[in-house]
Each structure stands twice: as C-alpha cells, then as structure tokens.
Image: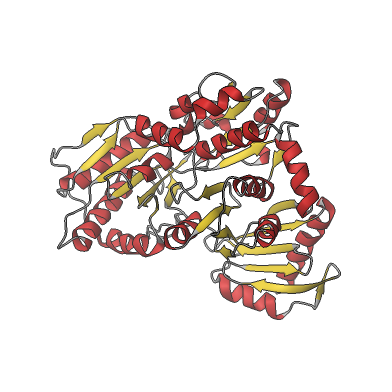
Amino acid sequence: MSSHQSNQISFGTDGYRGIIARDFTYDVVRKIAQGMADYVAYKYMRTEKPTIVVGYDRRFMSDRFARTLAEVLAANGLSVTLSETPVPTPAVSLLTTKGFGLGVMITASHNKHFYNGIKIKQNGRSAPPAVTAEVENYVGKAVPLKPNGAAVAMKDFRPAYVEYLASKVQASKVLPKLPGPVAVDFMHGVGAETAGVFGTKNVLPLREKHDPLFGGVAPEPVEKNLQPLVDAVKKHKALFGAALDGDADRFALVSDKGQYMTPCQTGPLMLEYLLTKGKYKGKIVQAVSMGFLTKRIARAAALPFEETPVGFKYLAEKMLQEDVTFAVEESGGYAWKGNLPERDGALTALFIAEMVAKTGKSVSALYAELEKKYGKSCFVRRDFALEKAIPNKHSFAVKIKKKLPKLLLGHKITETNTIDGLKIVLDNDWWVLMRPSGTEPLLRTYAETDSQENTKKFLDLAFKLVEQK
C-alpha cells in the first residue's frame, strides 16, 4: 500500500496500491515500469531476458495504465504481451508458468473503486519479498524511457485460464450433477470475464456487469458486502453462494442456509474434504490470522502444521519449497496441492461445487459434521483506530508479551507468536491476534473461540492490553 506522505513506492502485502490521480498516476506507472526494466536488465545481464505478460482488471483506467506500462517495458527492448481484455489475477500468475518469465497485473484487488495498483507475478505466484524489494530500489532511481513505438503484442488470455480451471475441476461434469442452483457473486469484478467456466446450467450470476464503481461497494467478499448474495441464496434455494473479489483471487462462501461462512470455517471444510481425496503427507500452512479448526484437523490427520506472517506470498513460498497439502489465509485465499501456489477465487468455487456434488451433502450438513468432530468456531475481526501509527510491529508485540498475566479468560496461555504482531493462544486453542498496520494508525485484532460472546470478550481484553501498553 502506498503512503501519500512519502514519495517512496513500496510493494506491501501484495503489490503497490494508491488512490487514482493522487498516488497512482501515469508518471508513477511509468516509473514502476522503468524500475522493473532496470531490474530485469541487471538481473538477467548474462542470461536471456524474460518475456513479460501484462494483465489488468475492470477498474477505472486499468486498460490505459496497462498499455502505458507495457510501452515503457517495450521501449527498454523487452518482449511484452498485453492482454486484450480484463483478466483475473490468477490468470496472469498462470501465464508465468506457461512461457512468460514475469507477469504484471494492474489491479487494486478488493479496495474501493478510487484505488488502483500493481502486482508482480513470477513462477505462478506473487513475486517474493526479495524480488519486490529489489524492484523498489530500482524504481526509486528510475528515469523512464519515452515510448518509442516498439511493438507490444496483444492476446486474449481468457481461454488459457478457462482451460486450466477445467483441467483442475471437471466443471462440465460436476456442475450439471448438482441437485440445485449455485449463486456466484462477481461483485462487478474481473471474475465475470471468465464466467463461462461455470456454464449456464445451475448457475445464477450476480453483479456480473462491468461497473468501475463496483455498485458503490468495495469489491471485497466479506460479510457486510454480501447481502445480495445471501438474499439470492435464500430466494432461489441455492446449494451455496460463492463470491469473488475485484481481481478474482479471493473467495467467500455462503451456505445453503444463507449463512456467511468465515474463512476460519471455509478453510477447514475444504481441508476435511481434500483429505478424503487422497493420501496426503504434506504440511498444512496458514496465515497467523487463521483459526484452530485447521490446526485440529492437521493434528488428527498427523500432518505437520505451520503458521506464516499475513500475506499469501509467504504461503506461496512454502508451497514452492516444501511439500504442502493445503494453504489458507484469513482474507479468503485458498490453495492446495496439484495447483498453482496461488489463491484463485473461481477454482475455489469449483472445488466447493465438486465437494457438494461428490458427497451428496449440503454445505451446512458438511459443516455441522465438522463442528461435531472438531468443535465450534466463532471468528471475529475488529479494527481499532489509534492516535498514531505503530511503526515497529515486533517491539509492540514484545512490550505487550512482557505484561501478559498467567491466565486470560480463565485459561492458561500456551503460546505467544510474534511473527506478525502478537498472537496469544490459550490451552483450549482459543486465540487472539493484535496486528498494527505499520502504515496507518490502525490496529487489526482477530479472535476465535467457541461462541460469539467469548470472542467479543477476548477482543475487548486485547484492546485493554494495548491501551495499557
């Protein structure tokens, strides 16, 4: 995320983002493009330079920003292909495993309509922090070359992405077998560009029209933004509702009863079904802001388990370097063995459709079984405004950790994790996480217990701990 106060262009949790015409301008796009070109020139001095694919979402001016970026890269003598149409972010990630060495996506993901941004992709996932840090250094010193008429090839990449999805989940076989309709909410985002993968039979598309204002709602698939989907599921007696964010890499699930399922419920539901599909020995990895049900399933299946800082790029690295069965983050990112090390909203929706078709059970029935086996999950995230930003997450975490009492909510503290803020885990698996934003005066708090009441108590307690700091 960008900071308006500084001229430093930095790639945050997943790329650079800024407000259009204030932080995100043609000049900024040219500067980033030149920084990338300089990075490539240096990095690939003695080897063949990678070909680059440039994609963009449905946001205001995304197509023009993408063309500007591609022209600067081409002026630097790089081989660039620009998407002919808006495409989902996972499509650009896919292309970096099919002949392109680097991918660039013009998107601000789930942010409000007045934002735009840039994500860099490599080896089927977001470029790792080591790469984006180097690119940032070059961007800081970049003097953009003027477009010189160098050729920018264009191609429609949607068929390649649809083919990939169809190869992973046999949508044409699964969807017609469903005993009822499925509601898919595209939130006016780019996922609707490849909606054909869902077919027309049994599928109710919502908010699929191109609208750069996203109907006045941020295209983020969280409970407060999904009332139209909940209503459609109830009205049409849908088997489930699926929602994709603005660039179609995040996913949210609404059950057949019209109940929004938190990622701390959706992730375990997917993992439990995945484990019935084969003998998996790989690790279960999740962001530190995820819950205890995945941990309990991993424990029961005797699979290794690990938590990472928040940001799908950390999970992607694990998937590339280790044997990982399933990876999940709290903001709606899901990935599993046999696919790209990347979150993908459409693929996740198809996976849920397959789960319902193959088990012959509803989402609510499957979740009730899971809850009976592993316990109840009540997860809540709450953001607090602070007087001033907390610049150092780690020292913040260490200060609070030192002042912790022996018991919280009548339970012993069994673990304190400081990889990204402070996560406190109790002896019954209940947990609370406090994560300062780092760039703005905001504290993100997350908690999970067995009831709404206990979760709210835990969040209140967390805020008191921060106030005492």
Of residues 183 and 64, which is closer to you in this image?
183
- Percent x, y of residue 171: 51, 29
Height in image: 211 above or below 443?
A: above
Residue 219 visible (yes or no): no
Residue lying farthest to the front in this orientation: 279
Height in image: 401 above or below 241?
A: below
- Percent x, y of residue 364: 74, 37
Residue 374 visible (yes or no): yes
Residue lying farthest to the bottom in this orientation: 402
Of residues 405 and 431, which is closer to you in this image?
431
- Percent x, y of residue 17: 44, 49
Quadrant for residue 162, please give it.
Answer: top left
- Percent x, y of residue 199: 50, 22
Residue at 60% from the left image edge and 24% from the top image edge: 177
Residue lying farthest to the right in this orientation: 410
Residue lying farthest to the top in this orientation: 201
Taking the image as shown, residue 387 lies to the left or right of residue 197, namely right
